Amino acid sequence: MATALREVRQQTGWRCVCEAIVGVSEDVDSRGHPMLVRYWAMCSVAGAFTPTHEVDAIAWVRPSEAFLRLTRDSDRRLLSGAITQLAALVERVDPAHSLSSG
């Protein structure tokens, strides 16, 4: 969890709290080493986005829009499997922004 929080802070400028793991995948890094990747739902608590060499823009979008923007099938599958969990999380932490319509 600490690694995920540090990466988000370094790449986006946002300080977040982890709410739930929404997926896990196995991949290979750029040197060919196996890696386990955990995907977290997070809530931002402070910060402001500053573009970096790794992330030049961020966007808050509904899952249906995110699905269209994703380029990897594995990411689309992960998002599809997490939509119900994400909707319940948003309903709990920010009911005014319910995902039920998208």
Image (cartoon, helix red, strand yellow):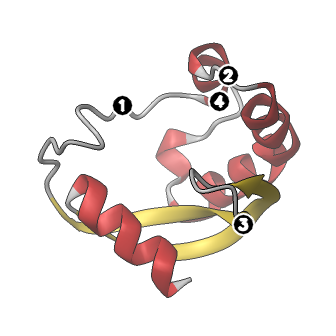
* Residue type of the residue flagged with mark 1: Ala
Which structural element holds mark 4? Answer: helix
Q: In the rendered image, which quarter contains the C terminus?
A: top right
Q: Are marks 4 and 2 in contact (CB under 8 Å)?
A: yes
- Badge 4 is on which residue? 63
User: Extreme front residue here?
Assistant: 31
* Residue type of the residue flagged with mark 2: Phe
Density class for disc 4 (Cα within 10 Å; few <14, some 14-19, many ≥20) is some
- Badge 3 is on which residue? 35
The span from disc 1 to disc 2 (Cα, nearest Å) is 13 Å
- Badge 1 is on which residue? 59
Identify the residue at image location x=60%, y=40%: 98
Vertical relation: 72 (above or below) 87: above
Q: Are marks 3 and 1 in contact (CB under 8 Å)?
A: no
Which structural element holds mark 1? Answer: loop
Q: Position of residue 90 (x, y in %)?
A: 60, 53
Vertical relation: 8 (above or below) 102: below
The span from disc 3 to disc 1 (Cα, nearest Å) is 27 Å
Comparing 19 with 30, the one in front is 30
Q: Are marks 1 and 2 in contact (CB under 8 Å)?
A: no
* Residue type of the residue flagged with mark 3: Met
Task: In the rendered structure, find residue 25 and report the number of the disc placed on it.
Answer: none
